[in-house]
Amino acid sequence: LKGIQYVYSIYYNKLEFIRFDSNLGKYVGYTELGVKNAERLNNIPSQIAARRAQREAYCLNNIGND
């Protein structure tokens, strides 16, 4: 799984306001609301662990499809 990046983004009104990036291992906010939510989500260890696990669960099963 080296070199594979898992990205989970949330959009509202066609504007990305928060993203989880597996290379960073945390949420990043792109708007005022997104920054607040990123700070909140980054302080929940189970949320971060679940997103990190998604990289392996999703990418490992679909790596041969592309």
Image (cartoon, helix red, strand yellow):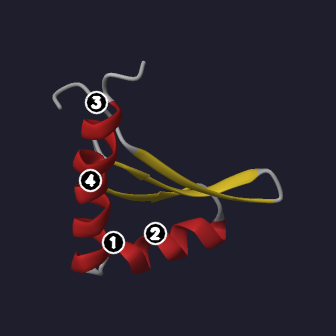
Q: Please, what secondary structure does the residue beneath circle 2 have?
A: helix
Residue pictured at 46% horizontal, 69% vertical:
38
Q: Please, what secondary structure does the residue beneath circle 4 have?
A: loop
Q: CA distance from mark 4 to mark 2?
A: 12 Å
Upstream in the sequence, badge 3 or badge 4? 3
Are there few (<14), some (14-19), or many (20+) residues within 10 Å of tag 4?
some
Q: CA distance from mark 1 to mark 4?
A: 9 Å
Residue pictured at 58% horizontal, 66% vertical:
34
The reply to whether dot 3 and dot 4 touch (C-beta < 8 Å) is no
Three-letter amino acid code at the position of disc 2: Ala
Three-letter amino acid code at the position of disc 3: Ile
The residue indicated by pointer 3 is 4
Residue pictured at 28% horizontal, 47% vertical:
55
Upstream in the sequence, badge 1 or badge 4? 4
Three-letter amino acid code at the position of disc 1: Asn
Q: CA distance from mark 2 to mark 1?
A: 6 Å
Q: Position of residue 3 (x, y in %)?
A: 23, 25
The reply to whether dot 2 and dot 1 touch (C-beta < 8 Å) is yes
The residue indicated by pointer 4 is 25
The residue indicated by pointer 2 is 38
